[in-house]
Image: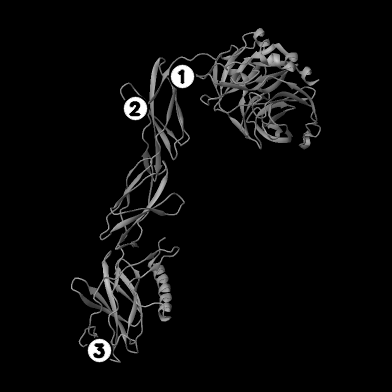
Amino acid sequence: MYFTSRKKRKIAFAVFAAMMTGIFSGGFMGTTRYAIAAEGGSDAAEVSAPEGDGVQESPAPDSSGSEPTSLPTAEPAGVLQVTGLQMLDNTTDSITMAWLGSVTEGGSYYVYQYNMEEERYDFLGSSQEMFYTCSGLEPAKKYYFAVRVFDEKNGTQSEFSERLEAYTKPEKVKGLSLQHNTASEIKISWDAVEGADGYEVYCAEPNDTYVLAGIVNENVFTDSGLNSGKTYRYKVCAYSCAEENTGALSAALKTTTLPAKPVVKVKGGEKKARITWAAVTGASGYYLYCYDGEEFQYLSTLVGKGSTFYIHQNLENGKYSKYKVEAYRILNGTEYKSTISDEKKAMVAKQKSTVTSPRLFKNKEGFKNSAAYKKCEDFKKKVNYAKTYVIPGISGTNVDGFYSSNMCPQGLTFAKSYMLLSAYDRKQEENSVLYVLDKTGKKLILTVALPNKTHAGGIAYDGYNIWVTQSKKVHAIPFAEIERAVSENAKTLQVAFQYTSELTHAASTLTYYKNKLWVGSYDELKSGYLGAYTIKDKKGKPTLSQYALTRIPTRVQGIAFTDNGKLILSRSCQTDSSKRGFLHVLDVYKPDLSKLSDGAITLGKLLKTWDMPTMNEEIAVSGNYLYVSFESAAFSTAVKRMDRVCAFKTKSITE
């Protein structure tokens, strides 16, 4: 886009050589305009010579540069003639020109500057070559020149060439600085350049090339329609006499738009409030403010773009709590703040307990009158109502002081004398949970709040840890933490995922069998994976190592092995038959694990299939029974809904 004067001169001389060829071949005569092509483009700078009355006589200078005598002027058809006077290059204080012509031995070209005010030619200097550089000029100023030939040997001189209009470049722009910025605009200014007619402003996003952003007459520019929280770089050059006659580009200014205004939500809990917002592009962090009854006061600083929630603790129930959030961005050591968010408030109040009553069927009679019971013949024949568990929390769950009415049941496992069920919040407001039920009494005794909003489709117990699925990862929670909370009669418990293992495939369901953690993946259209993993250091910092891997059918939601080596797959998809892939069955296989140590698993042939109510999820074997969890109670549009973990004699399913 911009070149050094050396490069320009090289290009210009190449152009001029081409012009000479055209002239001497008869295709070009004297001109009053010049054009210099810029490298990498076709744009050219053109300047018209001023209107004049032709050529004025001037005596030939002697060796001292004075003009003592006059020489006769050659005839126009003679050889003493200068044509094609052009400007080849210019700087802030010089103009280089070139022309076409010929001189005999002893002759010279004499260069003159034309004084427009006094209408006279002032001698500048002579040259034996067909180019000349006039130095010591003022920046951003227009000048006029002419050239003639002096042939002292023959006693003749040529007429003046047609006058050349040329100009020096304006000086380099300095003092480029930021004046003002918003989330969508950047206003910059710079020191005015003397003699400049205007300015070209160039902008580049990070790692991009500079492009023309605008042309202005004043030394200020506003760039609009920008993206919030983004870095932009600017350079400016002045132009004078013509837009193509630009000075050197300024030093770069690196600046930014402001982060966008945060959009905030506040949810009240028991003696606490949670403030959340969407991550703001380009934010380095956030400032939180809380209303103290008179004004908003600084509450906390959260560092990092992804730090998008804050729980304000130790509040008084029965009162509203109000908040605002401000995003900030750090660039080159300077802080840029967003517009502060709108005020948001929520009532801080005592929260209800987790609902343990059935969502759909109050009793056995309601259960047996359900569509799930009446329309699923296999289910009707084999289910053992006395062994079923009411799934808690579907109608409402207290998640460590915050309440959710959108929990969806998922995983199932047994650990010592407890049944554990996982669930996630369909609205993604609250973190996922584990419901801990007394295995014998079937009562909810503890709700465990997980540290994130994982789908938690699979959970399993290895004798020391509860494993929880999340995408291509599984997390381990020491079961001792849960036992400790139960012994202390706690109603809720917050846990962290202390140990995480990455997998090669998605983890949707889990089971523990033959001292291995078995991980199954779900796919609606393609076969999934079933992997066996050894667990190292169960009692300390457990990690997984893949032991064997095979393929399993589509839509697998749960897996369980029986004592005699049968494999039961819980397969389901969608809420009703109008949806693609609608399915709700239990499939039974007899896999060949004889070569498991070699990493080989053979699933074998499908032995049996049993129809289930809609949306059966994870399964687990405990004693002589197979237990099946369902998520359909959380979906009002589902057919044949079920709100229980249902029990079946394992042999009735496998034999």
Up the image or down, 362 lies above or below 635; here it is above
Which label sits in the foreground, 2 or 3? 3
List x then y, in percent, for residue 549. 73, 35
Q: Which of the labelled discs sits on residue 269, or is there none?
A: 1
Up the image or down, 387 lies above or below 94; here it is above
Taking depth in this image into account, of 579 and 552 the one nearest to the observer is 579
Q: To which quarter of the image does residue 542 belong? A: top right
Label 3, label 1: how many angstroms apart (C-alpha)? 106 Å
Residue at 34% from the left image edge and 83% from the top image edge: 128
Marks 2 and 3, the one that precedes in the sequence: 3
- Amino acid marked by disc 1: Gly
Determine which residue is flagged by label 2. Answer: 297
Residue at 58% from the left image edge and 12% from the top image edge: 356
Q: Do the residues labelled 3 and 1 touch (CB within 8 Å)?
A: no
Q: Residues within 10 Å of mark 1 (few under 14, many from 20)?
A: many
- Amino acid marked by disc 2: Gln
Taking depth in this image into account, of 208 and 215 the one nearest to the observer is 215
- Amino acid marked by disc 3: Pro
Q: Residues within 10 Å of mark 2 (few under 14, many from 20)?
A: some
- Of helix, strand and loop, which one carries label 2? strand
Marks 3 and 1, the one that precedes in the sequence: 3
List x then y, in percent, for residue 314. 42, 19
The answer to whether 175 appears left or right of 288 in the picture is left
Marks 2 and 1, the one that precedes in the sequence: 1
List x then y, in percent, for residue 208. 46, 52
Determine which residue is flagged by label 3. Answer: 72
Residue 417 seen in render: no
Q: In which quarter of the image is the C terminus?
A: top right
